[in-house]
Image (spheres, rainbow, N blue to C red):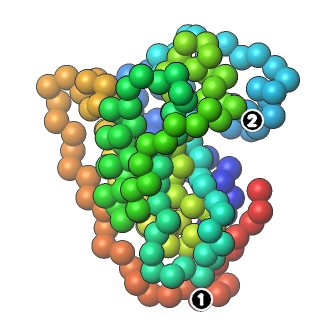
Amino acid sequence: YGTEASLVRKLAPKIKAELSKYCTVEILNTARNWYYYLQTSNYDFTRFDYIIELHGNAGVYDQNGDGTTTGVEVFVTTAEKYTTVETDLVKKLSSFGLKNRGVKVTDFLVISCIRNQGVSCCLVENGFMDDKDDMKVVHDNMDAYCKAFAQTVASSFGLMGNKKPDPVKPTKPNNTKPKPEQIKVEKY
């Protein structure tokens, strides 16, 4: 299914296209490794109201799939007082068949740098890159997943006004096993 970077580069423009119906959205330089960049450089995040850091988790080593997803989770920093948006988001994304791992509080470097500038933010782990079951759910439902992601953020922030979101339903999981040559896992 590719690398974390390739997953994020697929998700971000689709989420932006839907979320842009409700607010101004900017995708920051995806060629930049923000983790390394922020260790040596300053970036002014204060022009933003909220930042969503997109990621794919790893560490379960289930490249063949075992029929069970490892899940989606959202991280915030210790400075966040409320997690309503993040709780709504992880609940909605898990409705596609990903295990709901909840909202967790951890001061990861990237979101800490953002939050230290007074800007609320979160880091979304969109499934586990090394869990075939997770990646199948995300890839098989990519458009609906991104639409639901954006609509949940917009709705949770009250950006939708009187407009009701279009119904978004995940497709039924395909339980057929892929051929070994269809599974590609790269280290990142």
Q: Residue at x 45, y 80 (%)?
A: 67
Q: Nearer the viewer, residue 87 or 165?
A: 87
- The x, y position of residue 38, in whole percent, is 76, 26
Q: Are marks 2 and 1 in contact (CB under 8 Å)?
A: no
- The x, y position of residue 9, in whole percent, is 61, 47
Q: Is residue 95 left or right of residue 118?
A: left
Total numbered badges shown on the rendered structure:
2
The local secondary structure at tag 2 comes to helix
Q: Residue at x 26, y 24 (%)?
A: 158
The quarter holding residue 130 reads bottom right
The residue identified by callout 2 is 35
Could you give the CA–CA distance between mark 2 and mark 1, rounded to whole angstroms?
Answer: 35 Å
Mark 2 or mark 1: name the one nearer the start of the chain.
Answer: 2
Q: Residue at x 34, y 61 (%)?
A: 96
Query: Which tag is nearer the camera, tag 2 or tag 1?
Result: 2
The quarter holding residue 161 reads top left
Label drawn at residue 179: 1
Q: Residue at x 62, y 16 (%)?
A: 116
Q: Residues within 10 Å of mark 2 (few under 14, many from 20)?
A: few
Q: Amino acid at mark 1?
A: Lys
Q: Amino acid at mark 2?
A: Tyr
Label drawn at residue 135: none
The local secondary structure at tag 1 comes to loop
